[in-house]
Image: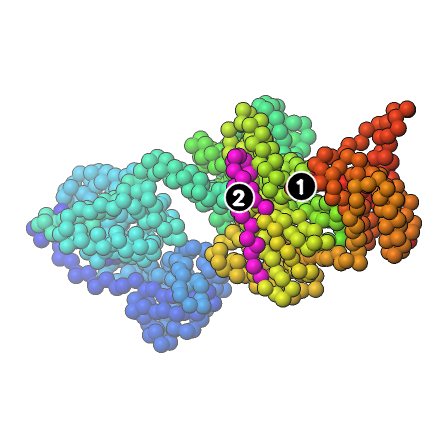
């Protein structure tokens, strides 16, 4: 049995025991000539094999243009070949080189792209493979004999290598059968000699690596496929040569530039001579195609669950679909979203007879240019799909379809659409069209194509594409629905908040509202400013639990209830008690319709209610689980008002307490919701310090104060809604307020009218004397007739309002009634109601105050 050749050009010879003619000892095999060329075409590395091949020492080559190594008459072609190689992952071809002594050498070169550290991002590694000087035969190879093991299919080829030991010429057919078996084996097979250089490679090896046997002969595996898997395989082959027995790998080296292929099982087997010495290694790799593909599809599907739909941006989700599909499933992908999504039930089996407009939202390709870039277009471009095209048909039918480049539907589409013509005119050979549908709505279409993958799409690929597309469609549909709901909620929220602040003279006020920046949506934070009788003003800040339309609607109901209770002039603690009962009723009404957390009717809502009186400078406050307000005195001291916390609304049965304090003129009040303090990047103490510092800084306007607070507290969009209300106190001094104590005697009514008239004259309000006299007369008369002493008359003059108030110790409230024809009384309050802008009654712990307001003319 003849041994395997140990280097290119060595002929196999018979063993020592076999008779035969004497043979010349083969020359020592030379190492492959390798060099590195950077992207500029400059040689950066030069091996010993390259020096032996062309005779140049490294000092004469490194740093010089590689084109100087080309033969003069082949310079143009060689330079073009190098430029072609610079844009690809691998290149091979025959190039005429010039030896240092002037000889021409034709060599077949194999070039790989590699990445190097430093400013140069691309290197071209060129390996000199087998070749013959022009007009010469390989050294050590007799004239007329084939080099490298012969020609596949010839008698000489493989008879000594893979024969059964039968002498040449005896049963020659068995040698041919052995060669055929090796060449046509349904797996990848290769033989590496004792120096781990490739000697033989079968057709499977050539097909997988896209290289011929001649191009690979004499090279080590890492030189053929530069990859860590090749290094690992070579290490195991060395172990086989050293007597370690057969070795196994769970991967195989793929074509250069594509790395390892996990779908292979590789075996390394020693080849022994008759004496039992290991002379070579046989590599056999079997592809576990279906198992590998199924595993890859499941991994891709699992990866898609984490990578598709990470944001509420439809464009980003479409791009995530394209990114996950390429290169795992396809070589390029394009996602088109319909300009107007179509809603409905089951898709129609017939395609519509009109074109369909869409917007190309995402594109991804394995190439920077080429088929995918030229045909897939760019994101944002408008696409019009002709009627009866495959895309329109798939959208109408509601399921995906597979097409090859010769499909009649694609060809007809290409005649109608130049973009499709470019697609079919490229190297793309397989296309999938998959509609994007979610919850009965058709959102768009995803296109997938292959031009690098040799295998066309199959049914399992279509299933995977539909699964990936469905995930993206659900995410896009949800984000669009959330966006619509967010817009509706924002519109509702804005409409329920005060559009303008009411005119009043007790406080200067500025407000801010910031919706949450998360996908949870807008919450139920609100604020309100409510003018009360006697020049007083109520300030309200509240926070409804939950987010979305339900929270905003609940906020609107509670704000309306607060305004209604404020009109009754209830003290802050009583107002919160009534509001607590309302929340309990809302929760009971909704508990039978929905069990979700947001159907609690506002349970857990917090609220702060404050009433400021500019005459007495006193502020009464009560809170239901809400953060306490901050107060800033005119000297710049900042403190929290010690308002009892109280329980959140909706718990029921727990009391609320009113806290009263006197505020100097020019004091600052800051009311806010807890979203202002719930910052991610600092703790609560740091947040409070920042807020206090922003409030303490002098500012000309309250808008500046609001902006400073938000700037100091927020470094990002808030996770929760924020409502902020800042008010500066004013005072109505004694020159704007007049009061008289009256006896409980009907004769005092005339004196009360006289006091009022004289005061109006002092204020320059003679025009208001008639209505004021009538109002004072009626209110004082009712207090004397139906109330109890003591009785007090008070006039309050604001800029545009005059208020008349009469206090008595009775808790009986007057009410307006319609007087009949012969009734002697009952018309006084009717006249007051007609002449005054508004009137009412407010109760205190003891007694009541009946009041009436009239508007003063601009003069």
Q: Residue at coordinates 57% horizontally, 54% vertically from top-left?
A: 641
Q: Residues within 10 Å of mark 2 (few under 14, many from 20)?
A: many
Residue 121 found in image quarter: bottom left
Instruction: Work out whether residue 705 or residue 792 is closer to the camera in this orientation and state it.
Output: 792
Q: To which residue does mark 1 refer?
A: 846
Residue 211: in magenta span? no
Secondary structure under tag 2 reads loop
* Residue 173 x/y as whole percent: 22, 38
Q: Residue at coordinates 70% horizontally, 36% vertically from top-left?
A: 811
Q: To which residue does mark 2 refer?
A: 646
Q: Residue at coordinates 33% horizontally, 44% vertically from top-left?
A: 262
* Residue 416 x/y as whole percent: 65, 36
Left or right of 247 on screen, residue 94: right
Q: Residue at coordinates 35% horizontally, 38% vertically from top-left?
A: 295
Residue 614 found in image quarter: bottom right
Q: Would residue 565 be seen by someone viewing this image from the given angle?
A: yes
* Residue 712 x/y as whole percent: 57, 60
* Residue 844 x/y as whole percent: 67, 42
What span is in magenta? Answer: 638-658
Residue 349 found in image quarter: top right
């Amino acid at each position: 049995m003849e041994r395997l050749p140990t280097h290119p050009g060595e002929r196999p010879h018979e063993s020592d025991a076999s008779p035969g003619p004497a043979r010349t000892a083969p020359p020592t095999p030379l190492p492959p000539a390798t060099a590195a060329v950077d992207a500029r075409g400059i040689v950066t590395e030069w091996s010993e094999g390259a020096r032996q091949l062309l005779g140049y020492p490294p000092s004469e080559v490194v740093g010089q243009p590689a084109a100087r190594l080309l033969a003069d008459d082949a310079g143009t072609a060689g330079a073009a070949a190098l430029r072609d190689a610079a844009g690809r992952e691998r290149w091979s071809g025959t190039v005429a080189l010039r030896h240092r002594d002037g000889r021409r050498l034709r060599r077949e070169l194999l070039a790989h792209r590699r990445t190097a550290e430093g400013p140069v991002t691309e290197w071209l590694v060129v390996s000199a493979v087998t070749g013959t000087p022009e007009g010469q035969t390989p050294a050590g190879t007799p004239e007329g004999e084939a080099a490298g093991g012969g020609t596949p299919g010839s008698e000489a080829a493989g008879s000594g290598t893979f024969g059964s030991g039968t002498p040449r010429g005896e049963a020659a057919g068995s040698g041919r059968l052995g060669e055929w078996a090796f060449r046509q084996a349904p797996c990848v097979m290769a033989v590496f000699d004792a120096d781990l250089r490739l000697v033989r490679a079968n057709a499977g090896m050539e097909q997988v690596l896209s290289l011929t046997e001649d191009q690979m002969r004499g090279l080590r595996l890492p030189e053929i496929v530069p990859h860590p898997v090749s290094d690992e395989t070579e290490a195991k082959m060395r172990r086989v040569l050293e007597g370690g027995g057969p070795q196994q790998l769970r991967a195989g080296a793929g074509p250069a530039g594509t790395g390892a292929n996990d779908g292979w099982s590789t075996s390394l087997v020693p080849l022994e001579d008759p004496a039992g010495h290991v002379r070579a290694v046989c590599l056999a790799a079997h592809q576990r195609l279906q198992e590998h593909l199924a595993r890859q599809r499941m991994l891709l599907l699992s990866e898609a669950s984490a990578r598709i739909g990470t944001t509420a941006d439809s464009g980003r989700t479409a791009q995530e679909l394209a990114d996950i599909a390429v290169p795992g499933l396809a070589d390029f992908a394009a996602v088109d979203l319909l300009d107007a999504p179509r809603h409905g039930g089951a898709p129609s089996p017939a395609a519509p007879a009109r074109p369909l407009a869409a917007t190309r939202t995402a594109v991804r390709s394995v190439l920077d240019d080429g088929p995918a870039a030229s045909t897939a277009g760019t994101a944002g471009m408008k696409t019009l799909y002709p009627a009866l095209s495959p895309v329109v048909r798939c959208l109408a039918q509601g399921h995906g379809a597979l097409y090859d480049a010769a499909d009649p539907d694609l060809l007809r589409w290409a005649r109608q659409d130049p973009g499709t013509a470019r697609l079919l005119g490229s190297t793309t050979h397989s296309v999938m069209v998959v509609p994007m549908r979610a919850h009965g709505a058709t959102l768009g279409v995803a296109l997938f194509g292959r031009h690098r993958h040799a295998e066309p799409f199959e049914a399992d690929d279509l299933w995977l594409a539909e699964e990936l597309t469905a995930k993206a469609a659900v995410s896009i549909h949800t984000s669009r629905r959330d966006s619509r709901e967010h817009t509706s909620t924002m519109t509702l929220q804005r409409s329920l908040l005060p559009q303008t602040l009411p005119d009043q003279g007790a406080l200067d006020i500025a407000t801010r509202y910031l919706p949450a920046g998360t996908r949870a949506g807008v919450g139920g934070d609100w604020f309100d400013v409510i003018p009360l009788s006697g020049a007083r003003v109520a300030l309200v800040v509240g926070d409804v639990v939950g987010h979305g339309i339900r929270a905003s609607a609940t906020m609107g109901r509670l704000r309306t209830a607060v305004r209604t209770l404020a009109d009754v002039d209830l003290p802050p603690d009583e107002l919160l008690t009534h509001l607590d009962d309302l929340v309990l009723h809302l929760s009971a009404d909704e508990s039978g319709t929905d069990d979700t957390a947001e159907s609690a009717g506002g349970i857990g809502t917090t609220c702060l209610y404050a009433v400021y009186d500019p005459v007495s400078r006193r502020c009464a406050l009560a809170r239901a689980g809400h953060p306490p307000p901050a107060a800033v005195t005119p000297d710049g001291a900042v403190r929290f008002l010690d308002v009892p916390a109280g329980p959140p609304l909706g718990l029921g049965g727990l009391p609320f307490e009113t806290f009263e304090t006197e505020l100097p003129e020019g004091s600052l009040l800051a009311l806010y919701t807890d979203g202002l303090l719930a910052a991610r990047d600092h703790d609560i103490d740091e947040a409070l310090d920042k807020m206090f510092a922003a409030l303490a800084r002098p500012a000309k306007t309250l808008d500046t104060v609001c902006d400073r607070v938000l700037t100091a507290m927020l470094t990002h969009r808030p996770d929760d809604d924020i409502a902020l209300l800042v008010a500066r106190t004013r005072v109505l001094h004694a020159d704007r307020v007049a009061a008289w104590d009256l006896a409980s005697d009907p004769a005092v009514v005339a004196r009360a009218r006289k006091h009022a008239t004289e005061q109006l004259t002092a204020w320059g309000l003679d025009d208001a004397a008639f209505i004021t006299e009538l109002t004072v007369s009626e209110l004082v008369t009712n207090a004397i007739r139906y109330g109890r002493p003591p009785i007090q008359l008070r006039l309050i003059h604001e800029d545009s309002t005059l208020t008349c108030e009469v206090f008595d110790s009775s808790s009986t409230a007057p009410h307006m009634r319609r007087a009949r024809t012969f009734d002697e009384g009952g018309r006084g309050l009717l006249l007051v109601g007609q002449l005054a802008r508004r009137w009412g009654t407010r109760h205190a712990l003891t007694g009541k105050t009946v009041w009436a307001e009239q508007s003063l003319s601009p003069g």
